[in-house]
Amino acid sequence: MVSRVGVFIVIEGIDGAGKTLHSRGLCIQLHKRGFDVRYTAEPSNSFIGQLLREEFLYRRKAPPEVEALLFAADRFQHVKNEILPMLQQNSVIVSDRYYYASIAYQSAQGVDTEWIRCINSFAPKPDLAIYLDVPADVAMSRIRRNKSVMEKIEFERKVREIYLDLVKQNELIYVDGNKPVETVSREIFNLALEIVSKARSDSQE
C-alpha cells in the first residue's frame, strides 16, 4: 500500500448504536476546527457496496463466508478509490464501519476470525478505531426504518460480545454510547482531536 500522510478514524458499533450520527457529527466538529475532513462508510458506494445494501442486507441472506468475501471486495474498492487517495491529500477520514465489522458480524455466524483477517489483510490500520457500545435491546429500539436481515436482537448480542473482545485486545477504544448524546459526542471528539492534532504537529516538524 502507498504511504499515507492524513489521519484515518473509524467508528464501529452494532446496528442502532449511533455510529452514523456520531461519525457525521465528528466530521462537523473537526471541520469547524479547520481540518479538511471527509465522511465515508461501509458498505461503500461501489457497485459491490450497492449490491450488499440492496440485495444481501434487505432481500436475501447469503452464506456468511460469501458475505465476508463480498464485504472484503467492497472494502478493497473503498480503500483503493477513497481512503488512500484522501489520505494522500492530507485529509482526516472518518469511516462509519470498517473491517472490524466483518470480524464481528461474520464471526458471530461461525466464520473463522483468522480467515476474515486474512482476506482483509490489504486494509490499512486506522489511526483511531472507536467502538460505540450500546446494549442490543436499546440499539434495536432505536431503529425506525425496516430492519436488515442481520438486525435481530440475539444476533446483535453475539456481535456486541465480539466487539467487546476486540476492545479487550486493544484493537478498539471503548466509548459508552448509552450516555447522553452530547457526552458521547464530546468524548469521541476529544479522542479524535488528540490524534489529529498530534498528526498535524508531527507533519510540521
Image (tube, grey):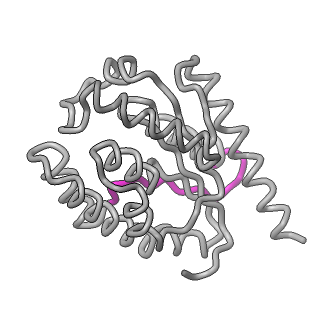
Q: Quadrant of residue 70?
A: bottom left
- Above-or-below relation of 35 to 88: above
Residue displayed at 38% across by 69% down: 119
User: Residue 178: where, in percent of width, then height?
Assistant: 53, 20
Which one is nearer the viewer's eye here, 133 or 119?
A: 119
Q: Residue furthest left?
A: 60
Image side of residue 20 versus residue 166, left or right: left
Q: Position of residue 132 (x, y in %)?
A: 53, 34
User: Which picture quadrant has residue 156?
Assistant: top left
Residue 31 x %, y %: 63, 49
Query: In the orientation shown, which residue stands out farthest toward the bottom?
Result: 2
Q: Looking at this view, is 192 or 160 the one in front? A: 160
**In x, y percent, where is residue 141?**
32, 18
Look at 53% across and 73% down and name the residue there.
84
Q: Is residue 200 left or right of residue 7?
A: right
Q: Residue at x 54, y 44 (%)?
A: 166
Q: Nearer the viewer, residue 121 or 129?
A: 121
Most foreground residue, 167 or 52:
167
Q: Quadrant of the N terminus?
A: bottom right
Which region is colored magenta?
31-44
Name the side, left or right, on which 108 lies relative to 94. Answer: left
| The C terminus lies in quadrant | bottom right
